[in-house]
Amino acid sequence: VGALLIGTAVYGNRYTDLPILPSAIACGIVLIFLSILGLYGAAVHHQVSLFFYMIILFCLFIVQFAIACSCLAVNKHQQEIFARQGWDEIDDDLKAEVQSKFLCCGFNSTTAADHPSCDAVNKLCIDTNNLCPPCLQELENTIDSAFRVTGTIGLLFSFSEVSLLRVCVCV
């Protein structure tokens, strides 16, 4: 899991400059060291290292479980607030890229001045009389599925950690 987390963060870091990606790499490194600690404790039957492994794993479970539940609990209005904050923070080049990828114009209104020109994108929106819809309409399903998938995967991994904790208690 740690190597997968590091790999996806490095891959994502090649294409974006999100500040969360170095944190994901650090979490992956911590997970690898934690797994080495568990392997060491199990291989040499060292109860102190297994005890610390269990404590750290339990803390990790609580954090992952809380984050997964919060991802699954985010409603449409909160998603719109997060998306608005993200839209306000990014530069015009990235806004233009989003507009061309999703064939949309502006965030919540096509007439607002919070986005680059939509002339090139509007030419591609043939089925809507050369007027693209706002990006929020186009991004709602993508944002919602991202939260749902992240929450579900977080729950899956947190429950797998609980099962590992149960194995440690039995050893």
Image: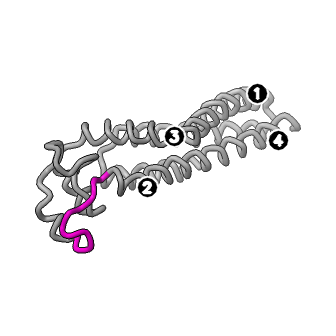
The residue at 40%/51% (across/down) is 10
Write the start and end of the magenta stretch as one range: 125-135
Residue under numbered circle 3: 75
The residue at 76%/25% (across/down) is 48
Q: Residues within 10 Å of mark 1 (few under 14, many from 20)?
A: some
Label 3, label 2: how far apart the Cα atoms are: 14 Å
Q: How far across and down, in percent of the image, does residue 139 sit?
A: 37, 54
Q: Specify the amino acid type for callout 4.
A: Val
Q: Nearer the viewer, mark 4 or mark 1?
A: 4
First in sequence, mark 1 or 2: give its number: 1
Q: Specify the amino acid type for callout 3.
A: Asn
Q: Give the prevailing secondary structure in the magenta stretch.
A: loop
Label 4, label 3: how far apart the Cα atoms are: 36 Å
Query: Can residue 43 be seen by looking at this rendering?
Result: no
First in sequence, mark 4 or 1: give its number: 1
- Marks 4,2: beta carbons within 8 A: no
Q: Nearer the viewer, mark 1 or mark 3?
A: 3
Label 1, label 2: how far apart the Cα atoms are: 41 Å
Residue under numbered circle 2: 142
Label 4, label 2: how far apart the Cα atoms are: 38 Å
* 123 inside magenta stretch: no
Residue under numbered circle 1: 51
Q: Nearer the viewer, mark 1 or mark 2?
A: 2
Front-lying residue, 50 or 114:
114
Quadrant that contains the C terminus: top right
Label 1 SS: helix
Residue under numbered circle 4: 167
On screen, residue 153 above or below 84: below
Q: Specify the amino acid type for callout 2.
A: Thr
